[in-house]
Image: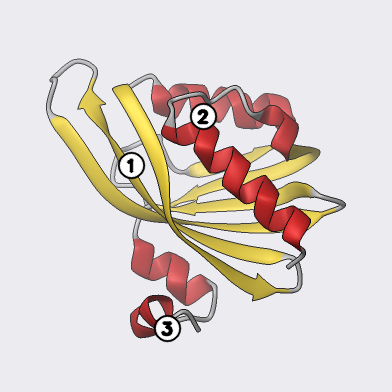
Amino acid sequence: MSQENLEVIRRLYEHWERGDFSTTGFFDPEIVYSRIGTETPGMEGEWRGLEEMSEGTRDYFRVFSDLRIEAERIIDLGDDRVLVLTRQTGHGKLSGVPFDHQLGDLMTFRAGKIVTMDAYWHRAEALEAAGLKEQDARSGS
């Protein structure tokens, strides 16, 4: 992965960590965004293009207050692919219950923009999709 792509990832997650989700400029206009393995009905799916992706993420964010997404680890997979091991924190908007969950985002780049983003609810599934095992992620392989 190019240094430019790594910088895009770092800047994107800096925004998300602050709770700033107005970040469509990081994505290709024809982005394919998928949420995989969620445990809440209606939260899993695939959205095509910036408008659909924005709509899908708004629906997801709507159930949380103070949602933050932190990149705990960025793993270069080569071939313009990257796996980001993330932690999401916040509170349920209606319940107030604290939320703290580890996930994985698998992304592909083209011309400096993210063209696919597969957001896995279970980190182990993200690692498997990337061709890695838990120990690979810890060792940096």
Residue at left 36%, top 77%? 138
Per the rendering, the mark at residue 136 is 3
Percent position (x, y) of residue 127?
A: 44, 72
What residue occupies the far right of the structure in this picture?
111
Q: Position of residue 1 (x, y in %)?
A: 73, 68
Q: Amino acid at mark 3?
A: Asp
Give the image's coloring scheme.
secondary structure
Residue 2, compared with residue 63, is above or below; it is below
Q: Is residue 95 left or right of residue 18?
A: left
The Cα–Cα distance between marks 3 and 2, rounded to whole angstroms, is: 30 Å
- Number of the front mark, 1 or 2: 1
Q: Nearer the viewer, residue 34 or 13?
A: 13
Reply above or below: 41 against 74: above
Q: Could you say whether the residue bearing mark 1 is in a helix, strand or loop?
A: strand
Residue that appears at 63% across and 57% down: 107
- Could you say whether the residue bearing mark 3 is in a helix, strand or loop? helix
**Residue 57 image position (x, y, % from top left):** 51, 29
* Residue 46: mark in rendering: none
- Pointer 2: residues within 10 angstroms few (<14), some, or many (20+)? some
Q: Is residue 17 left or right of residue 134?
A: right
Residue type, label 1: Gln
Task: Give the total number of marks visible in the rendering.
Answer: 3
Q: Which residue is mark 1?
A: 88
Residue for badge 2? 57
**What amino acid is at disc 2?**
Thr
